[in-house]
Image (spheres, rainbow, N blue to C red):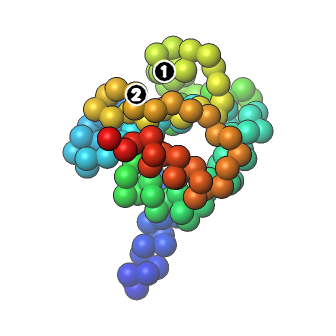
Amino acid sequence: MPLSLLICLQLAVLPWLTDLQQANVAAEREGKVIFLLFTGSDWCPACRRFDKNVLDTEAFRGYASRNLVLLKADFPRLRRNQLPDSLAAQNAALAERYNPEGLFPYIVLLKTGQPAWKGTYQGQTADAFIRRLEQALQP
């Protein structure tokens, strides 16, 4: 398989974790920051725009693969999309700790287990959003 095709396939799907402990281990092992996303995947229009305009872009996928461990806390409303009880409880605990206002989509960057930045999607392009993340992570 040509290398360019392999790279495209790797970037096509981002590996979203759903367990904070696994994300912490991966972030420490890889020297990356955790990108914790609170989303309402099946009901939140702003979340869908964020997916389309940022998360699903080649620019974000490339940036994320180099710099981020992706952790998703989803809060679906439709019955067919309900999460297992253990995952729903875990997401609720994450929201209580990092997103008590219940904002969607809401992003928390965690460095060594501590919030380094919190924010919402403001409708910007993927490149502008990436610049925002880079600024937030500067020492």
Res 58 → quadrant: bottom right
Residue 49: x %, y % from top left: 72, 47
Q: Which mark is residue 78?
A: none
Q: Residue at x 48, y 21 (%)?
A: 98
Split into 4 quadrants, where in the image is the C terminus? Answer: top left
Q: Mark 1: which amino acid?
A: Tyr
Residue 26: x %, y % from top left: 29, 43
Q: Residue at x 43, y 35 (%)?
A: 109
Image height of 86 relative to 125, above or below:
above
Residue furthest to the left in view is 29
Q: Are marks 2 and 1 in contact (CB under 8 Å)?
A: yes
Residue 118 falls left or right of residue 82? left
- Give the camera-side residue of 129 and 47: 129
**What is the C-alpha distance between the residues marked 2 and 1?**
8 Å
Image height of 58 relative to 14, above or below:
below
Q: Which mark is residue 115?
A: 2
Q: Can see residue 86?
A: no
Image height of 42 relative to 85, above or below:
below
Q: Which mark is residue 98?
A: 1
- Give the camera-side residue of 85 and 22: 22
Q: Residue at x 62, y 34 (%)?
A: 120
Q: Can see residue 114?
A: yes
Residue 15 falls left or right of residue 23? right
